[in-house]
Image (cartoon, grey):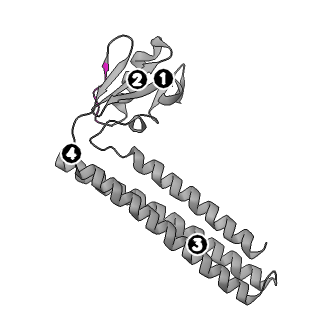
Amino acid sequence: MNVSDILKSAKDSMDKTLEFTQKNLEKVRTGRASASLVDNVKVDYYGSPTPLSQIASISVPDAKTIVIQPWDRSTLSSIEKAIQSAGLGFNPMNDGSVIRIPVPPLTEERRKEFVKMSKKIAEEGKIAVRNVRRDNMEALKKGEKDKDFSEDDKKKGEDEVQKFTDEYIRKIDDLQVKKEKELMED
């Protein structure tokens, strides 16, 4: 394995970590309605837990409402139960053809809980980025030891991996700050 392969691997892994962290931050509820709030709710669909997004269309007609239209009407009550038991603090209303979820405004206490949760998600993302850095630094040391490339190449590779690490940690921090602002406004 040469230095450019190691650098490509590091960047790819950090990209995936950033994407994963971003998706998890999107799931943290703000005071606004968003389809991502209920996307991953698991519904008992003919005996198997199925993500809501696979059995219904989810739309957001306004900032305070989520509308779920199941493709199979017989799943309405299962969807309603799944949303109630998901611990999202929602009270779904079933009108026989669609489920409407009014998104209540967040209390100050809940906002602070969600900020804390978003910080934890961001910290987990930064730890994952640092783990990628560690693994790739070890790969660079091993490559130099195995005479795959020179010490100078190893040093340049380490500098690049560190640059990637700093860049991705900054991006994760930016995502978290943006999420915190969303949570605290309204």
Circles 1 and 2: CB distance less than 8 Å?
A: yes
Q: Callout 4, which amino acid?
A: Asp
- Per the rendered image, the range of residues in magenta is 89-93
The CA distance from mark 3 to mark 4 is 38 Å
Is 91 magenta? The answer is: yes
Name the residue furthest front.
Answer: 62
Q: Callout 1, which amino acid?
A: Ala
Position of 126 relative to 181 (above/below): below
Name the residue furthest left.
Answer: 108
Q: Earlier in the sequence, mark 4 or mark 1?
A: 1
Identify the residue under disc 4.
186
Q: Earlier in the sequence, mark 3 or mark 4?
A: 3
Location of the N terminus (image quadrant): bottom right
2 vs 4, front mark: 4
Q: Which mark is residue 56?
A: 1
Q: Which mark is residue 133?
A: 3
Predominant secondary structure in magenta? loop
